[in-house]
Image (spheres, rainbow, N blue to C red):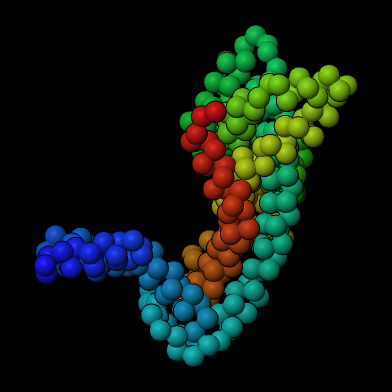
Amino acid sequence: MTSSVAGSATGGATALGLRAPRRLTSHRGGRLLVRAVLFLVVIGIFVVPLWSMIVTAFSGGAPKLGQVFLWPHGLSAGNLTTAWRFGLGRGLVNSIVVEAIGLTLQVTVSAFAAYALARKRFRGAGLVMLAILATMMMPEEIIAIPLYLVLGKISLLDNYGGLALPLVGWALPVYVLTGFMKRIPVELEEAARVDGAGDLRIFFQVILPLCLPALGTCAVFGFLMIWDQYLLPLLVAQSPKMSTLTLIVTSLQASQEQGEGVRLAAAVVLMVPSVLVYLGLQRLFERGLLSGSLKG
C-alpha cells in the first residue's frame, strides 16, 4: 500500500512536470568540483589580468615599475591624460582613418573577387585561389623591405595611402566569401537574369544581402588585422604626426619615464575599439561562423 502511494505520488509529480531533487552523489560532486576548478582557472587567466589592467590604468595611486593593482587606489583619469599628451589622441585618429579606408576597400575588393571566383567559370580559377591562399603562408617580414621600396617609389611613405592600401589585399575574406557564395543557390541568380538583371545588379541586390553573415565575420577579422598592424606603420610612418595607435602604445611601453598606469591606460584605449566592434557585429559574426560550418 505504501509503495503504491509513493508510486502514485511520483507519477503525479512527473505528470505535473516536476522533478525530485537529485541526490548529491560522489560522482556528481566530483564533476562540480572539476567545473569549479576550471572556472577559477579561466578567471585567473583571462579576467584577472584584464581587471588589473583597467584598475591600474584608472587608479589614483602610482604603481611601481612592473607592479599592477588588483584593487583601485582611488579613481583618477590622470594616467589617461598623461598618455593623451604623449600623442595618444593623434595616434587614435590616425588609426581610425586607416581603419576606415583599409577595411572598406578590403571588404569591397574581397567581395568582388569572391563573386568572380564563386560564380564565374574560367580557366585557372583553382590556381588563382591557390595563389591567393599562398599569400597567407608568407610572413609579412619577408615582403617588408620590397614593400618599403615600392611604396617609396610611388610616393606613399608617410601618408594614409601607404598605411591603408597594402592592407586591401587579404586572402582570408576572399576565401570566406568565396565559400559562402558557392552555397547560394544558382536558381536565384538565374531568376534575376530572367528579370533582366545584369551582373552588378545581381551582385548588389541578390548576392550581397545573402552574404551579410559572412561579411560580418570578414569585417571583424579585418578590423582586428588592420587595428593591430605594427610592422607596416613602422615602415611607412616617417614622422610623429602619422604614427598610429600601436606605435604610440609601443613607444610608451619602451619609455622609462612613464609609469605603469600611463602604459596600461594607453593599452586600454587600444583595446576598447576592438571590443566594441566585436559586440556590435557579434550576431553577424556568430552566424557567419555557424553557416561556414554547415553544408547546404
Q: Residue at x 42, y 75 (%)?
A: 52
Q: Quadrant of residue 106?
A: top right
Residue 136 pos. (x, y %): 52, 32
Q: Residue at x 62, y 43 (%)?
A: 213
Image quarter where the C terminus lies is top right
Residue 97 pos. (x, y %): 73, 55
Residue 276 pos. (x, y %): 61, 62
The furthest residue to the right: 196
Image quarter where the N terminus lies is bottom left
Relative to residue 50, is residue 275 depicted above or below? above
Relative to residue 3, is residue 191 depicted above or below? above
The reply, left or right, for residue 202 in relation to residue 244 is: right
Nearer the observer, 210 or 96: 210
Q: Is residue 197 visible?
A: yes
Residue 138 pos. (x, y %): 50, 31
The reply, left or right, for residue 233 in relation to residue 69 is: right
The furthest residue to the top: 123
Q: Quadrant of residue 171?
A: top right
